[in-house]
Image (cartoon, rainbow, N blue to C red):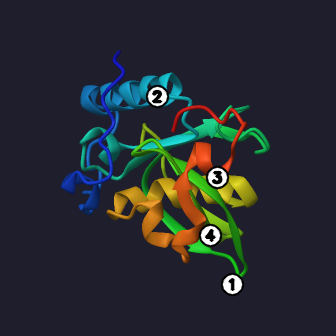
Amino acid sequence: MAVRSVLRMGDPRLLEVSRPVERFDSAELRELLTDMQDTMHALNGAGLAAPQIGVPLRVVIFGMQSNPRYPDAEPVPFTVLVNPVLEALGDDLEEGWEGCLSVPGMRGWVPRYKRLRYRGLDASGHAIDRTVDDFHARVVQHECDHLDGVLYPMRVRDLRDFGFTEELFPGENLGDD
C-alpha cells in the first residue's frame, strides 16, 4: 500500500508504551501490516515495530533471508507478531552489533538474551509460540523493545561501543540504517 516515514530517535512517540491490539482481521490492521511490510522492505530492515511509523499498537514484523545491513546473519522467517510476550530461556546473554531504522547511520554493541520463547498472535488472531536463539532472538527482542518505548542505544553498556556505522566499519557496505 505505502512506504511510511519512520520516526527517528528524539521523537517522543518512540518512548511511549504501545496499546494491545483488540480487533483482528480488520481492514485497519491489514493496512497497517501491509504498510509496515512495504516500509521494512524498502529500507532493507530486518524488522519493524508499529510505533516506528507512529502507530502505538503492540505489533511487530520481522524476517529476512539475506540483508545487506546484516550480511552474516542467519535467515529469520517472516513473522507478524501481535501482542507479544517474551520469556528469556536462561541467563545467557550475547552481545552483538545492532542498528535501527529509527537510529539511522549508527550501530551499537547490545547485550541480548541468547535464547528465548516468544508468544503472541498472528494477524488473524491465531496463536504463535516459538523458541528461538541467536540472531532470531536478537531481532525479536529489538523489535519488541519498541513496544515499550525502548531504543537499542538505551541498552548499550559502554558508549565507546556506539557510533556511526561508517566510522565503526570503514570500507564495509552495510547499507543505510
CB atoms of marks 2 and 3 within 8 Å: no
Report the residue marked by disc 4.
Answer: 112
Of labels 4 and 1, earlier in sequence is 1
Q: Amino acid at mark 2?
A: Gln
Measured in 3D between alpha carbons, the distance from the residue under mark 2 to the one under mark 3, in whole angstroms, is 29 Å
Quarter in which the N terminus is drawn: top left
Relative side of 100 to 93, left or right = left
User: 9 above or below 16?
Assistant: above
Task: Answer with left or right where residue 54 lies relative to residue 89.
Answer: left
- What is the CA distance from the residue labelled 3 to the residue labelled 1? 29 Å
Cα distance between the residues tagged 4 and 1: 10 Å
Q: Nearer the viewer, mark 4 or mark 3?
A: 3
* SS label for mark 1: loop
Q: Nearer the viewer, residue 158 or 56?
A: 158
Percent of width and height locating residue 156: 52, 70
Mark with earlier residue (4, 2): 2
**Mark 4 or 3, nearer chain start:** 4
Q: For label 2, count other residues whose C-alpha is less than 10 Å away and answer few (under 14), some (14-19) or many (20+).
A: many
Residue type at mark 4: give it: Arg
Q: Could you tell which of marks 3 and 1 lies nearer the N-terminus? A: 1
Vertical arrangement, residue 93 with respect to residue 148, above or below = below
The tag on residue 91 is 1
- Kindly identify which residue carries mark 3: 168
Label 2 sits on residue: 37
Q: Secondary structure at mark 3?
A: helix
User: CA–CA distance between discs 4 and 2?
Assistant: 24 Å
Q: Foreground mark, 4 or 1?
A: 4
**Residue 167: x, y in percent?**
60, 48
